Amino acid sequence: MNNHEQILRIIFEGFNTTTKNYSNCFLMMWESNFSQKKLYELISGQNYVVCSEIKIDKLIRSLCEEGVGDLWEAYVSAERDGYFFTNFAEPCFSNLYYYNIPRFNELDFENLIGRFGGSKIPETVTMTPDFLLGDIVIEMKDLQNESLYNEDRRSTIAKIFEADSSFSVNINFSATKGKNQSLYKRAIANSVKNVVKKASKQIKEFSKTNSINTAGVFLINTGYFSLDHQLFKTIVEEIIAHDTTNIKYAYIFTQSMFHNAVGDLRADYKQDCIGELPSELNGIYEACKTLIDKKMSSVFRPDNDERSFVASQYPISFFADNKIFYWKPERIEPSIIF
């Protein structure tokens, strides 16, 4: 033990990945052992992810010794062991039972399109779109994999914020400003644009041997970190207006689910049509709302045969470019006050 070792105090809001609740976290560690990577490893080792700005200061040993109770004991532990971690957690229930919320998938929208007279196009050796409704072509794309668990997405984000000198960087889009926000939006848009570009190629190939009147895409936004629907809508509007010629319309659907530590659950559903929606698809909003009601009512049935469930929105943090990046969803106020 080195009695003269300088101790740092590190304060942040954390989210426990085991108990699924937020905490005010306090970490003490040797200054000589400090690095951003070591900090991230210690926090992750406690089953926490960072979800706030990280504040760091140096503790004065004599003042801690004069303090009462917990502060001095924590200081001594950090001095002896190299670090000390504690937290003050929000109230929660252990072993919460969460209802599994059915995730909307391609089959749901295939059935939806079928109600309007559309049918699945048989797959061939060449690329084909998904559906045909009279002389209207529809390609469906699921954005499930476009999430913050994607390593390429993380690398792109790290490059955008490489000039940021903070210990932790908030990558919620609404928290970004100026040039960083423009670059961030472009990165998000590029991933959506690539999806639409692929759909455009499939439609173009199909039109070589089939007569079509118009073509569009259905974009399902139900990933682990589904885009904010308004941002998603803005991006798709720009793509349809400026980056494609054979795709005339887009139907976009966002599904997001939120839990809190006392078991409250909220499932959000939003939809929009962009561009020149064919009259044959009029009524799709109402049809989708009916489908939502049907799937949600199945949650409470003992004979529920759903097999695909939507993941809840929880905070995430990751380490890249010698910084901790964090994203956190909207918080739901608890219905139970302790």
Image (tube, rainbow, N blue to C red):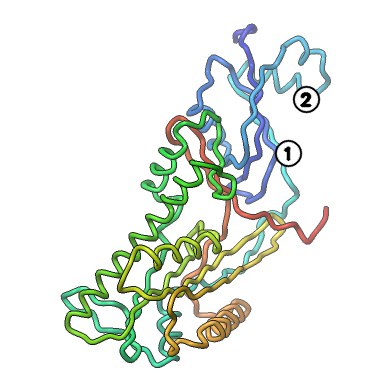
Across and down, in percent, residue 130 comes to 31, 79
Across and down, in percent, residue 72 comes to 76, 19
| Viewer-side label of 1, 2 | 1
Image quarter hosting the N terminus: top right
How many angstroms separate mark 1 from mark 2 (CA)? 13 Å
- Residue 303 shows up from this direction: no
Seen at 56% across and 41% down, the residue is: 170
Amino acid at dot 2: Asp
Q: In this orientation, which residue lies closer to the viewer: 90 or 18?
A: 90
Seen at 47% across and 73% down, the residue is: 274
Q: Are marks 1 and 2 in contact (CB under 8 Å)?
A: no
Amino acid at dot 1: Phe
Looking at the image, residue 193 lies above or below residue 86? below
Q: Which mark is residue 258?
A: none
Looking at the image, residue 124 lies above or below residue 57? below
Location of mark 1 (residue): 88
Across and down, in percent, residue 248 comes to 37, 75
Q: In this orientation, which residue lies closer to the viewer: 189 or 91?
A: 189
Q: Which mark is residue 70?
A: 2
Report helix, strand or loop for mark 2.
helix
- The answer to whether 92 appears left or right of 154 in the picture is right
- The answer to whether 338 appears left or right of 73 in the picture is right
